Amino acid sequence: MRQFLTIASNAFMELVRQPVFLLLMTCSAVFNVFLATVPYFGFGDDPKLVKDSTLAVMLLSGLFGAVLNASASVAHEIRSGTALAVLAKPVGRAQFLLAKYVGLAAALAVLTYVNALSALLASRMAYDAYGDADTRAFGIFCGALALGHVAAGFINYFLRRPFVANAVLAVVIMATLAFVVIVNFTKTTNRFGYSPNEVDWRLVPAAILILFALLVLAGLALACSTRFEMIPTLAICTGIFLLGLMSDYLFGRLAEPVWMASLPAELNNPLLEGDQKKLLNEIVEKYDKDKDGRLDLAEQKSLKPEDKQRLSQAGLGGRWWASLLYTVVPNWQLFWLADALEGKNKIPWSYVGRAFGYVIGYLGASLALGLVLFEERELS
């Protein structure tokens, strides 16, 4: 256990010492807050646009952070021979890979934490046509981050300690202090005396879900890094990311049984034969109690086993290959719930718990794949 914690902590410290990590964290946090100072002329939806944009920045910055850090953590050590030196000691490959992932996950958690603070602050600073840009909060936040960099520079100059690692720590501390000061000691203003804006704490579960997506992506990036360098890993992970965003459209609708879809649309589907349409019409009319042209969840549960078997035998039970790909490809839409924050709606914490179960299952599969690839890799 001590060796595992040592490798994980060393991996974490190595990642936060990367200049690209500090640059990515600082730029994404500043850009999130900057988004709240720009007028969008969104007909009252300006705050919603700001929140969606900050969540998107959080996701994209985490995507690059996961791939770059995974490549620096595994691919670079394999190429430089450091991995061989570590594995020459009584350390197994599974322990080495899992410890590297824990360090990578901790670094992504730090990156997401700072971005989440800036997103929460941006939700408070967002304004519509009746408000004004909160330049004071923007100045305090940016000044705090700049002060953190200056403090790290002084520590580096006088104490000869690494600049990047201390700058990351200083940015985390100063961003937290700036958030507390802005929320508790400043007020937003508007032109008509309306109540000031408050922090939209509904973004917290949304940010946690994005962190879950980044953890899944980090597992895939780590598996790729056991065989590929940074550029191929980035290309593969970007492809998986784009494919997962379209998973519902590409695979989900084909994996779904036809009798769960809209009856009028499926009866006009040229891919269905006449006998299939006749059987579909018969079954839907038999169980469609509210006559809305499709079987709701309660109506689907009332389907008799013999009728389900008839539908499956007729080729209306969904495509097996689509079901396979829909299961294998990670569905990022499960973690992107910005639309669920419309109005006063909230993301239930029970959903966050179920999403965590999905993350555990997918991480187990991706890390197992990475271990298989790593076991067969010759180290020199």
Image (spheres, grey):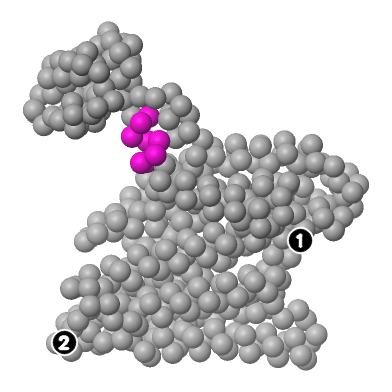
Q: List the single residue furthest toward the front.
A: 270
User: Whole-percent x and y of residue 36?
Assistant: 35, 78
Residue at 50% x, 73% y is 28
Vertical placement of residue 100 versus 371, above or below: below
As rendered, which of 280 and 117 lies closer to the eye? 280
* Res 109 seen here: no
Q: Does residue 84 appear left or right of residue 374 in this picture? A: right
| 10 Å crowding of disc 1: few (<14), some (14-19), many (20+) | some
Which of the labelled discs sits on residue 252, or is there none?
none
Q: Quadrant of residue 235?
A: bottom right
**What residue sits 72% from the left and 87% below the top?**
155
| Helix, strand or loop: magenta stretch | helix
Return the disc, 2 or 1, that comes first in the chain's sequence: 1
Of residues 58 and 276, the one nearer the viewer is 276
Please, is residue 95 above or below residue 288 in the view? Answer: below
Residue that badge 1 annotates: 10
Residue 60 visible in rendering: yes
Q: Which residue is mark 2?
A: 193
Residue toward you, 206 or 250: 250
* Residue 37 in picture, x, y percent from top left: 35, 83
Q: Which amino acid, mark 2?
A: Gly
Kindly state the secondary structure of the residue where label 2 is placed.
loop
Amino acid type, label 1 = Asn
Is residue 110 shown left or right of residue 196? right
Where residue 24 appears, as percent x and y from the top left, is: 57, 72
Residue at position x 80%, y 85% in the image: 160
Q: Position of residue 117 (x, y in %)?
A: 45, 71
Chain part drawn in magenta: 248-255
Q: Quadrant of residue 8?
A: bottom right
- Helix, strand or loop under label 1: helix
